[in-house]
Image: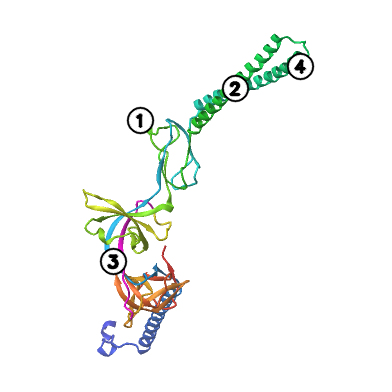
Amino acid sequence: MSSNHEHSPKPSLSDLKIDHEARTRDSGTTRTLLIAAVVLVAIATAAFFLIRRGGPVSVEVATVRPAPAGGSTTVLNASGYVEPRRKATVSSKITGKVTQVLVDEGMLVEEGQVLAQLDDSDARRRYDAVRAQRDVARASLEEIEVNLEDAERTLRRTLDLGRKGVASQQALDSATAAVEGLEARLAVARRNLASAEAQLAVSAQDLENYTIRAPFAGVAVSKDAQPGEMVSPVSAGGGFTRTGISTIVDMSSLEIEVDVNESYIANVFPGQPADAVLDAYPDWHIPATVRTVIPTADRQKATVKVRLTFDRLDPRILPDMGVKVAFLEIRPVESDAPAAVALVPAGAIRNVDGRSVVFVLAGERLDRRAVSAGRSLGSEVEIMAGVTPGEQVVVNGPDDLENGQAARAEN
């Protein structure tokens, strides 16, 4: 008996082959997927660059400064602080309890503006009492004036009767004495009224002392007292009595104070130009001028104080800011040498194809300018041509900036 297994065909190597149609179909599918992936990557890359190129790029800019006339070199460096010439901690003339504080930090105040109010209830009662005394003196004066007018009329009638032989000499003497006595009392009453007016003025001034006002226009930089606290023009000890209400600074009087080593003070003179850089804004160069050299030295530090004024104030300049000052020496420029027209930060100059260029932010677009660079002056470079003072140049931004690219300045 034979089985099915005996009659089944045996497998051979010829049976091991790949269907040509299936291989063609699978290859086409793979190729299609690869092409689609490449197209998607290309589209994404193009979209990325289009979005990047179309959107404004953030850049850091700096203002082009005018070059000093005749050129300049730094002869001395010093550091110091911004100090106001007018600064006052406003206090009261008397000791009292604060009832109102009408000032806060950063508030602009005008000259004579009320900053605080002290408890003036006792002073107001004294003022009312003195005013009442003044009113009594005035009424007494008016009474004497009325009596004097009546006595003068009586004297005139007595004189008329005496000329007619009707009135006696005694009556005439009595009328005369009455007038003279009232005239003396009137003089005393007038002096009493003047004294009462003076006392009232003193009382009014005492009452005014309970109102604390700003001595000049400026900005309140501190608030040193609160309602309910005691204030006094002198320290009362114990730490419970305030000596001031607020500190006022005249921001228009800001200047620079630096200590210069006495060995180099001969290089500094009034009217000398200088370049100031605030520690808070290291890329901002502020023109300044020496105002005065304080005519005394500090024997402990061997320094001399020098005060400089800012050529132009700016709201960013604040009291007690740290500042570095470079004192400049104006030197004549050689007649055959081109004169510098501007100063730009060294970081603004880029090298493109072997040429020095800067990117100027004009509106919302970048304008690439070829510039002629001169000497390096500290952190700045002289520019002979290519930019003008007041323009905004890029000092920090992407390396692949292009002409006409949309950009915006960082805050």
Q: Earlier in the sequence, mark 1 or mark 2?
A: 2
SS type, badge 1? loop
User: Residue at label 1?
Assistant: 236
User: Residue at label 3?
Assistant: 74
In the image: residue 208, left or right of residue 224: right
Residue 362 drawn above or below residue 197:
below
Can residue 3 be seen here? The reply is: no
Q: Residue at x 27, y 58 (%)?
A: 78
Q: Earlier in the sequence, mark 1 or mark 4?
A: 4
In the image: residue 180, left or right of residue 67: right
Q: Residue at x 71, y 16 (%)?
A: 155
Q: Earlier in the sequence, mark 4 or mark 3?
A: 3
User: Residue at label 2?
Assistant: 187
Mark in front: 3 vs 1: 3
Q: Position of residue 280 (x, y in %)?
A: 34, 58
Q: Earlier in the sequence, mark 3 or mark 2?
A: 3
Q: Earlier in the sequence, mark 2 or mark 4?
A: 4
SS type, badge 3? strand
If the image is split into quadrants, where does the C terminus sit? bottom left
Mark in front: 2 vs 4: 4
User: Residue at label 4?
Assistant: 160
In the image: residue 376, left or right of residue 232: left
